[in-house]
Image: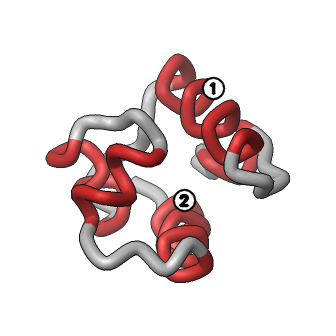
């Protein structure tokens, strides 16, 4: 578990002004339950999921990296 990952994703969540975790998960193409765990710090995303999150953040105009998404 990493609070750095959780903090980073929470900051992006706020920056994108998402109204729900579901909306955020859909924007990043991540399962809603998994996103909830990532945001709470209960679980780290896999490397495959990190790549997908970074790719989708870049499409949304947000510079990111796997190191930022998965800080373990």
* Mark-to-mark CA distance, 2 and 1: 14 Å
| Residue 28 tag number | none
Asked if residue 66 is positioned above or below residue 40 in the image, the reply reads: above
Please state the horizontal and vertical placement of residue 31, each as a whole percent of the image: 24, 36
> Is disc 1 surrounded by few (<14), some (14 to 19) or many (20+) residues within 10 Å?
some
Name the image colouring.
Answer: secondary structure
Residue at 47% x, 42% y is 28
Secondary structure beneath label 1: helix
Q: Nearer the viewer, residue 30 or 46?
A: 30
> How packed is label 2: few (under 14 Cα within 10 Å), some, or many (20 or more)?
many
Tell me where residue 45 sits by quadrant.
top left
Residue, disc 2: 5
Residue 39 vs residue 22, the one in the foreground: 22
Q: Secondary structure at mark 2?
A: helix
> Mark 2 against mark 1, which lies toward the viewer?
1
Residue 58 screen position, x and y as percent = 76, 43
Q: Specify which label sits upstream in the sequence, 2 or 1.
A: 2
Rendering coords of residue 8 (x, y %): 60, 67
Q: Is residue 35 left or right of residue 56?
A: left
Q: Residue furthest right?
A: 63
Residue 52 x %, y %:
56, 27
Query: Going by the image, does 55 lie left or right of 63?
Result: left
Residue at (78, 49) in percent of width and height: 64
**Horizontal side, residue 37 vs residue 51: left or right:** left
Q: Which residue is mark 1?
A: 51
Q: Residue at x 49, y 80 (%)?
A: 17
């Amino acid at each position: 578990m990493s609070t750095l990952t959780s903090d980073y994703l929470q900051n992006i969540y706020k920056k994108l002004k998402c109204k729900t975790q579901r909306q955020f998960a859909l924007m990043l193409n991540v399962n809603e339950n998994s996103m909830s765990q990532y945001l709470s710090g209960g679980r780290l995303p896999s490397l495959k999921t990190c790549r997908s999150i970074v790719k989708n953040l870049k499409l949304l105009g947000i510079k990111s990296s796997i190191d930022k998404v998965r800080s373990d």
